[in-house]
Image (spheres, rainbow, N blue to C red):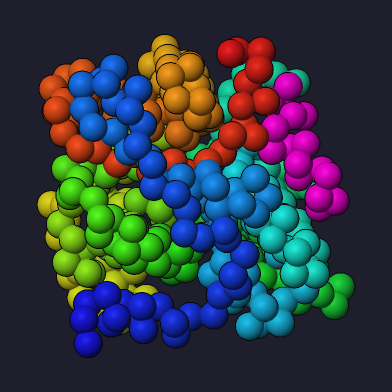
Amino acid sequence: MSPVERLATNLRRFPKVDVAHLPTPLEKLSNLGEDLGLSLFVKRDDCTGFAFGGNKVRQLEYYIGDAKEKDADTVLITGAVQSNFVRTAAAMARRFGMQCHIQLEERVSGAGDLYRSNGNVLLDRLLGVTIHTFPVGGDESGADKALYKLADDLREQGHRPYVITLGTDHPPLGALGYVEAALEYNAQRQDLDAFDAIVVGSGSASTHSGLLYGLRAIGDQTPVIGICVRRAASLQKPRVEGRVDDIDDLLGTNDTVQHGDVRVFDGALTPGYGKLNDITRRAILDTAGREGLFLDPTYTGKVMGGLMMLAESGELSGKRVLFWHTGGQPGLFAYADQL
């Protein structure tokens, strides 16, 4: 059995639902690449289709599959006010006949009325979910505990709740969506020259760690550079390292990813999660203006901004680079007053 077949067989042990529009396109960004002095391509996971698409669709196929397997009737999830994960989980829960309770955390200080009413928040409300709030934005353990308390209350009312956790003290089930995405990418790139680097957002680390694990599991040694969107590189690197080890545990494998393979860059992060800066604004405007491709301020805009910084520093100049677009465009409308 080949490494590809072995990994695909291992993934089939886990229940999942199939809603994403796959495979997503892999396209060349000739104009922007020429501007940056590199050969630039994009993996269009903004085109996963369901509920405005994005990377969370792949992850939630596994979470909702597990929830259905456990006969849940209610899904609970926590995230930032403009969370793409929350919006997609709410939509998927509704698709499969489940109620949904979402908990919105205060991660972005000084956010205005538009941030709290438009974009993903508007979509959450259209989905008819129950909205709760959590006053702290950096307490993953506390946010998860609040969800479990809510789940206990719902259980007492006769419901069968399923909690999608945020912290790293739970198995990274959603990361399997990006382990699987590595197989999709591997099939697509057979007719292409090899890439020198793949650039992807690194926040919860599920996408970053899953993709890195999947590539290494099938023998692909392409460097994967995670652009930090939530925390500094000194904190994000050990998080990704821990998550790839957790995927090993989940799939029953050992040492699939060497920790030295975990690369992160936080040059586009300041002043912090969900806050615009000059390089992110430039990335959003240049990518739209040169390629007709939209990015969001919280994730993909910062990822492209980081890619631009690495190109202009010489690290990526002249190379073949794949930018993994993880979606999130509804968030643009929450930042209209800043753009």
Rendering coords of residue 317 (x, y %) = 16, 25
Query: Could you tell me if residue 1 is visible in this image?
Result: yes
Residue 212 coordinates in the image, percent (x, y): 27, 57
Residue 26: percent from left, percent from top: 39, 47
Can you tell which quarter of the image residue 17 is in?
bottom right
The number of numbered badges drawn on the structure is 0
Residue pictured at 45% horizontal, 25% vertical: 291
Left or right: 30, with 298 as reference point = left
Region rendered in magenta: 114-129
Q: Height in image: 314 above or below 201?
A: above
- Magenta: main secondary structure: helix
Per the image, is 119 magenta?
yes
* Side (left or right) of 248 relative to 168: left
Image quarter in which the N terminus is found? bottom left
- Residue at 47% in and 53% down: 24
The answer to which quarter of the image holds residue 57 is: bottom right
Q: Nearer the viewer, residue 90 or 159?
A: 90
Residue at horizontal 18 percent and vertical 48 percent from the top: 193
Q: The C terminus appears in which quarter of the rendering?
A: top right
Residue 287 versus residue 79 in the image, above or below = above
* Nearer to us in this view, 317 or 313: 317
In terms of depth relative to the viewer, which is nearer, 132 or 118? 118
Where is residue 13 drawn, in percent x and y? 44, 85
Q: Is residue 279 above or below residue 12?
A: above
Can I make out residue 135 in this image?
no
